[in-house]
Amino acid sequence: MPFAWAECEWCHSKRRSYFNKEQHERLVRGEPSYHPCVFCLVATPWTWIEPRAPGQAGSPEAPLRPPSVLLIDDDEQILSVLSRALGGKDFFVDAADSAREALIKMVNENFDIVLSDVHMPGFDGKKLFHFIQEYLPEYRKRVMFLTADTESSQTRDFLQQSGCPFVFKPVDFGELFRAIEQRLAEADADTETDTETPG
């Protein structure tokens, strides 16, 4: 599915978003496309912005908003607590109570961090991570995990093999915030390395 950098004409947020082929073609022609905005939470007209190199003045990749975090957990109380805690640290927070709902959000918006529970009914965090590796590789180095499973060798092996940061439940918020900041720093470093690599 093609993506474009676009600006919401309602709140003027600039971010990458995915569009179907017809929407993408309209944007390139300069025609507005109505698409849900993660900040407005309503369908607003988006317009095409010519992509620029990372770090270039006015680049859509420049931080125009606080870092965004997508929370994924089937426990509504945990989602509520995490949302308040991260919101209090000036993160933009969105939440999904299933991996399937999260994928819809990830396809339509661009999140800086994806923080998922490992164990969920059916389509769990492990399957979500494998899906991301295969179909949404740009998210691969943005994923983090939460788990209350401190004993299972299968969970331990998965977390180790994924290479993703993880935090145990009950959550130590100081540890969580440090892990998120580290993940964001790593993503920034990877972006800079990719930019400097001769093509």
Image (spheres, rainbow, N blue to C red):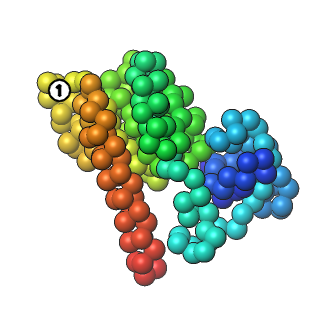
Can you tell which quarter of the image residue 145 is in? top left
Q: Residue at x 53, y 42 (%)?
A: 92
User: In this view of the protein, which residue sits in the foreground, 87 or 57?
Assistant: 87
User: In this view of the protein, which residue sits in the foreground, 41 or 150?
Assistant: 41
Instruction: Residue at the far bottom: name it.
Output: 198
Position in image of residue 102 (x %, y %): 51, 33
Mark 1, residue position: 150
Q: How many marks?
A: 1
Instruction: Residue at the far right: name it.
Output: 31
Judge whether 33 appears above or below 126 on screen: below
Q: Is residue 161 left or right of residue 31?
A: left
User: In this view of the protein, which residue sits in the foreground, 135 or 119?
Assistant: 119
Q: Residues within 10 Å of mark 1 (few under 14, many from 20)?
A: few
Judge whether 58 appears above or below 44 on screen: below
Q: Residue at x 26, y 47 (%)?
A: 163
Q: Residue at x 46, y 30 (%)?
A: 84
Position in image of residue 172 (x %, y %): 26, 33
Can you tell which quarter of the image residue 38 is in? top right
Can you tell which quarter of the image residue 177 is in? top left
Whether residue 17 is visible: yes
Q: Residue at x 38, y 44 (%)?
A: 143
Say what amino acid the circle numbered 1 marks.
Thr
User: In this view of the protein, which residue sits in the foreground, 172 or 151?
Assistant: 172
Instruction: Residue at the far front: name it.
Output: 88
Position in image of residue 151 (x %, y %): 14, 24
Judge whether 63 appears above or below 89 on screen: below
Whether residue 70 is visible: no
Mark 1 lies on a secondary structure that is loop
